[in-house]
Image (cartoon, coloured by chain):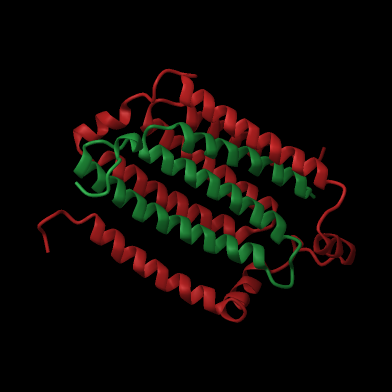
Amino acid sequence: MTLEEILFYAFSVLAIVSALLVVSLKNTARALFLFFIVLFAMAGLYLFALADFVAITQIMVYVGGVLILMIFAFMLSNKALLQDLQQTSGEFLSLPNWQSMLLALAFLIIMITAFVEWQTEAPIWVEQAKAQGTFIKATDNNIKQLGFKFMTQYVLPFEIIGIFLMMTLIGAAHLSRKDGQP
Amino acid sequence: MITLTHFLAVSACIFCIGLYAVLSKKNAIMILVGIELMINAAILNFVAFGRYDKINYGGQIFALFAIVLAAAAVAVGLALILNVYRHYKSINPDHIQELKD
């Protein structure tokens, strides 16, 4: 077993175990802080797919933006909301929990069996890339290529996402405004 | 080199944990966390497949777009949750049944 595999398994176990803890903890604040660890471990997993820029973006946008926003919304809200948030979601393995666990497990089994079936025949383009050696290698200059692609081939989605982000910014500011204020 | 199947198995586990959170939680912020987990699993699939797409870099680029969309969704979602709480004094989705008060 190489070092790469050991690190990959460590990161995936970290991600899965802390995600399980996130969904099973009763305390919302603790769950939100554990969500940090899940996101960091997912960023580590992206590195193993040689997506270094995506990993850095994950850390900057998710850990730096989304989670801070969630923790702000959680901690800056008033006392009644905090008490509502701390309420437990029924006893463990009550019927809704049990049903949802069954559903999630069934979905997991469906996906795992699909993977096992799929093992024998990968998509053609993956096979071609493997045969011709045109997959991304660790020595490639990924970020430079991504910048070129953003500004040439994918410039339309890039601009659309910029406009979309501005709309979201205005919409969120409008929604979170207090009533009666201009 | 890590094979594709490893990535797919990990992302399937993360996706199902997110699905469980969305289905079972009684608290809107935790439901949002579950949605984020599912989006993260999808992004992991994107980058794992995108490794074999050296010409177009489609996987990595759309993973970046998905991260931006998720961030936007969280911003609007949290604003909505706080607003809904102000109206209904509860963020349990089971109690929010009417559109207009």
Q: Residue furthest right?
A: A131
| Residue B96 in the image, given as x and y percentages of width and height | 29, 40
Q: Which quadrant holds residue A17?
A: top right
Q: Nearer the viewer, residue A95 or A81?
A: A95
Q: Is residue A32 left or right of residue A123?
A: left
Image quadrant where one finds the N terminus of chain A: top right
As drawn, A15 above or below A168: above
- Residue B16 visible to the viewer: yes
Please count the marks in the image.
0
Q: Is residue A148 left or right of residue A165?
A: right
Q: Residue furthest bottom?
A: A152
As drawn, A56 above or below B94: below
| Residue B4 in the image, given as x and y percentages of width and height | 76, 49
Q: Colour of chain A?
A: red
- In percent of the image, x 22 and y 49: which residue is there? B100
- Residue A6 visible to the viewer: no
Q: Is residue A78 left or right of residue B31?
A: left
| Residue A170 in the image, given as x and y percentages of width and height | 29, 66
| Residue B91 in the image, given as x and y percentages of width and height | 30, 38
Image quadrant where one finds the C terminus of chain A: bottom left
Q: Nearer the viewer, residue B76 or A43?
A: B76
Q: Which chain is green?
A: B
Q: Nearer the viewer, residue A11 or B18?
A: B18
Q: Which quadrant holds residue B33?
A: top left
Q: Which quadrant holds residue A101?
A: top right
Q: Residue furthest left?
A: A180
As drawn, A43 above or below A33: below
